[in-house]
Amino acid sequence: MIYLFIFILGLCIGSFLNVCIWRLPRGQSLLRPASHCPNCQNPIKWYDNIPLLSYSLLKGKCRRCSSPISPRYPLVEALTGTLFLLSLLHYYPITFTLSSSLLLLRDLLFISFLIPIFFIDLENQIIPNPLSYGIIITGLIINIFIHSLKIGTETIFYTNLFSPENGMHFYFPSFLSSLAGMAIGGGLFLAVYFLGSFFLKEESMGIGDIKLAAGIGVFLGWEGMLICFFLSFLLGAVIATTLLLTHLKKRRDKIPFAPFLVGAALISLFLGDKLLHLYLALL
């Protein structure tokens, strides 16, 4: 039942994230007015706002004006539900201990910031300040809260990635590691911004990407941020090359970078420690 609950919770959170994705780039309130069709402005009834189910029953069209509903809506809901469920399974079978429950809460909050950032930057090539600053502030608050409980992070959370314990291995960065991750994430991308702008004679990266990298560093710590930094450019190189070879993009076309950062952050969240241990084993 807890797996079903977490998945449904993810669907509901995903429905709210769709509101964020639509309204934040337009400077609209997240609370008012109530959900409505952007074409006919007709308020959406509760039974037409059930995640995944309503989209299927309405066949992807508004009940009143029959204008098409973007497939992004069920995609975001399904993606959020799936990532929430994966986060729960990540800590199986000790999900109900205090330590793993706090880690799960951290992951769910992290994912809830990353998904709207991914789609907003993909569609509008901007990262709204409430999200870029919000991920930094939320990460610091939850980090301070967890470490203020003095749970014994060294034995429960296995904070040292370089000395993994036998059996289950979970990682929660110390407060200093989070601060270092924020500085390294923001600093590395700030350096890329200035170097790229100097050599290309134009803005090579948005300021929002720098703030996003700092926020990711808060959640992942400096070790996880370094992995994320490498993976984001690897993903960017592979996808950008594919788009160029398939002529979907031209050399002078701008490609938003936040989706690569978000993808790398999710990989680092679930597989970062394993990737690091694999790399160290090869040395």
Image: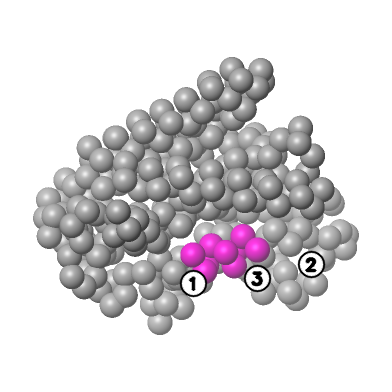
Q: Label for residue 52? A: 3
Asked whether 48 or 166 is in front, the reply is 166
Mark 3 is surrounded, within 10 Å at the Cα level, by few (under 14), some (14 to 19) or many (20 or more) other residues, namely some
Q: Is residue 236 left or right of residue 106?
A: right
Q: Is residue 211 left or right of residue 97?
A: right
Residue under numbered circle 1: 7
Residue under numbered circle 2: 60
Under circle 3, the secondary element is loop
Give the mark nearer the N terminus: 2 vs 3: 3
Mark 1 is surrounded, within 10 Å at the Cα level, by few (under 14), some (14 to 19) or many (20 or more) other residues, namely many
Task: Point out the stretch of residues depicted in magenta.
Answer: 75-83
Q: Could you tell me the amino acid type at mark 3?
A: Leu
Q: Could you tell me the amino acid type at mark 2?
A: Gly
**Does residue 222 lie above or below 69 as drawn?**
above
**Residue extending farthest bottom:** 1
Pointer 1 and pointer 2: residues touching (CB < 8 Å)? no
**Image quarter of the N terminus:** bottom left
The residue positioned 53% from the left and 62% from the top of the image is 80
Asked if residue 135 can be seen in this view, the reply is: no
Q: CA distance from mark 3 to mark 1?
A: 12 Å
Q: Residue 22 at what x, y percent from top left? A: 67, 46
Asked if residue 213 can be seen in this view, the reply is: yes
Under circle 2, the secondary element is loop
Asked whether 29 or 121 is in front, the reply is 121
**Does residue 36 lie above or below 199 as drawn?**
below
Q: Could you tell me the amino acid type at mark 1?
A: Phe
